[in-house]
Image (cartoon, rainbow, N blue to C red):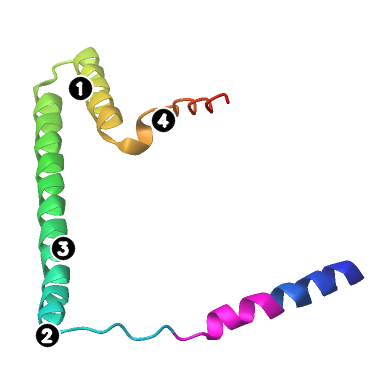
């Protein structure tokens, strides 16, 4: 317990100055300020466009699924619709895709 307290105290001594230090303000020119002000607006517009595109794709897929379900005449056709929707959903989400394994690191050159 005593070692833990000593370790915590030593770590607190070394980390506190890092939080207390104020970074020096960056020298900016009026041109840089204009570019910096425009950058967030551009990023906003790009993100908005990407989000709208994803929403449109999801709406289209939902309409396809709805048409499939409406056209189904029996249980098997309905199950086929469900499988089709599940299959397309699974392959378009990053979280559902298998993770790619990293290539092994190249061997260090022999001297």
Residue matched to label 4: 99
Marks 4 and 2 in Cβ contact (< 8 Å): no
Q: Quadrant of residue 61?
A: top left
**Mark 3 or mark 2: which is in front?**
2
Q: Which mark is residue 95?
A: none
Most common SS among magenta residues: helix
Q: Quadrant of residue 75?
A: top left
Q: Which mark is residue 43?
A: 3
Residue lying at the far right in this picture: please name it: 2
Vertical position of residue 105 compared to residue 95: above or below: above
Q: Residues within 10 Å of mark 2 (few under 14, many from 20)?
A: few
Total count of labels: 4
Mark 4: secondary structure: loop
**Mark 1 or mark 3: which is in front?**
3
Q: Position of residue 16 (x, y in %)?
A: 62, 81
Q: Position of residue 48 (x, y in %)?
A: 13, 59
Residue matched to label 2: 30
> What residue sits 23% from the left and 27% below the top?
88
Vertical position of residue 54 compared to residue 74: above or below: below
Does 50 lie within the magenta span?
A: no
Q: Which mark is residue 81?
A: 1
Marks 4 and 1 in Cβ contact (< 8 Å): no
108 sits left or right of 78 in the view: right
Q: Nearer the viewer, residue 18 or 47?
A: 18
Q: Nearer the viewer, residue 50 or 19?
A: 19
Q: Position of residue 93 (x, y in %)?
A: 29, 36
Which stretch is magenta?
13-22
CA separation, marks 3 and 4?
A: 28 Å
Q: Nearer the viewer, residue 8 or 64?
A: 8
**Mark 4 or mark 2: which is in front?**
2
Q: Position of residue 92 (x, y in %)?
A: 25, 32
- Dot 4 or dot 2: first in sequence order is 2
């Amino acid at each position: 317990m005593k070692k833990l307290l000593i370790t915590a105290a030593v770590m607190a001594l070394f980390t506190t100055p890092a939080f207390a230090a104020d970074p020096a303000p960056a020298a900016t020119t009026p041109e840089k300020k204009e570019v910096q002000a425009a950058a967030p607006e551009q990023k906003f517009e790009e993100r908005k466009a990407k989000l709208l595109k994803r929403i449109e794709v999801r709406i289209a897929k939902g309409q396809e699924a709805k048409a499939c379900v409406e056209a189904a005449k029996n249980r098997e056709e309905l199950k086929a619709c469900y499988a089709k929707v599940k299959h397309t959903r699974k392959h378009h989400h990053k979280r559902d895709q298998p993770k790619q394994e990293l290539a092994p690191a190249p061997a260090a050159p022999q001297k």
